[in-house]
Amino acid sequence: MEIEKTLDSLEAALQSDMRGFPRRVEIYNRLVKMAARYLNLPHPAARPQLVRVEKVRGNDYNPNKVAPPEMRLLRLSMGKDGQTMPVVVAGDGTGAFQVVDGFHRRSVAQNAPEVREALAGHIFIVELNKPLEDRITSTVRHNLARGTHKVELTAKLVTALKSYNWSDERIGRELGMDPDEVLRLKQVTGLAEAFKDREFSRAWE
């Protein structure tokens, strides 16, 4: 079939291409985007990209903290096994990216010489196209799914979401919390002030 011939020709052309690594990165990223459009599945994992690690920056709301032993293990893992999970990012409007999930992977890729060398100063990312308030909830969900989210820092994010005029119900839905969990969060963290304008309801839809 014609498409198989085209793919064979493309593979031969890629194997004979002697241009430098930056150009290969450019071609790789373009090919992945083409393949993702062909696949037509609306999942970020279908379109990983390779970018300079310096273009990926942390955020000021990430509540996930990793203890030194876990950071050493992450460095060992990335050194021995390579980067097995892309960093989840969102564009910041300047051509750079802000971390949504994977801050510590990004830190290891940037600061651990053996990992930085293995990745040629780059890092694999997948991009979310979301506004800041939705990125915050994405970060919380990623961290909660791994069981690494701290209560007091979750409270800070809930307060931030309240500043976007999110209702208690919406916060619960977006963070996967039932009414009792939100109530406990308020009680444990002293968030009554943040919620004072709304009566707590057990009748969420």
Image (cartoon, rainbow, N blue to C red):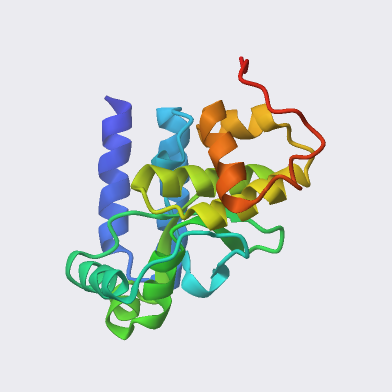
Quadrant location, the N terminus = top left
Q: Which of 144 and 192 is in front in this view?
A: 192
The relative height of residue 159 versus residue 73 in the rendered view (above or below) is: above
- Point 24% across, 65% down: residue: 82
Q: Horizontal placement of 40 versus 118: left or right?
A: right
Q: Which of 188 and 30 is in front in this view?
A: 188
The relative height of residue 181 versus residue 15 in the rendered view (above or below) is: above
Q: Can residue 130 be seen in this view?
A: no
**To which quarter of the image does residue 36 belong?**
top left
- Point 65% across, 63% down: residue: 95
Q: Which of 127 and 75 is in front in this view?
A: 75
Q: Can residue 78 be seen in this view?
A: yes
- Point 38% across, 65% down: residue: 105
The relative height of residue 23 versus residue 126 in the rendered view (above or below) is: below
Where residue 146 appears, as percent x and y from the top left, is: 35, 48
Where residue 139 appears, as percent x and y from the top left, is: 52, 49
Where residue 98 appears, as percent x and y from the top left, is: 59, 61
Q: Horizontal placement of 70 versus 41: left or right?
A: left
Where residue 75 appears, as percent x and y from the top left, is: 27, 73
Spot the residue most to the bottom: 113
Q: Nearer the viewer, residue 89 or 144?
A: 144
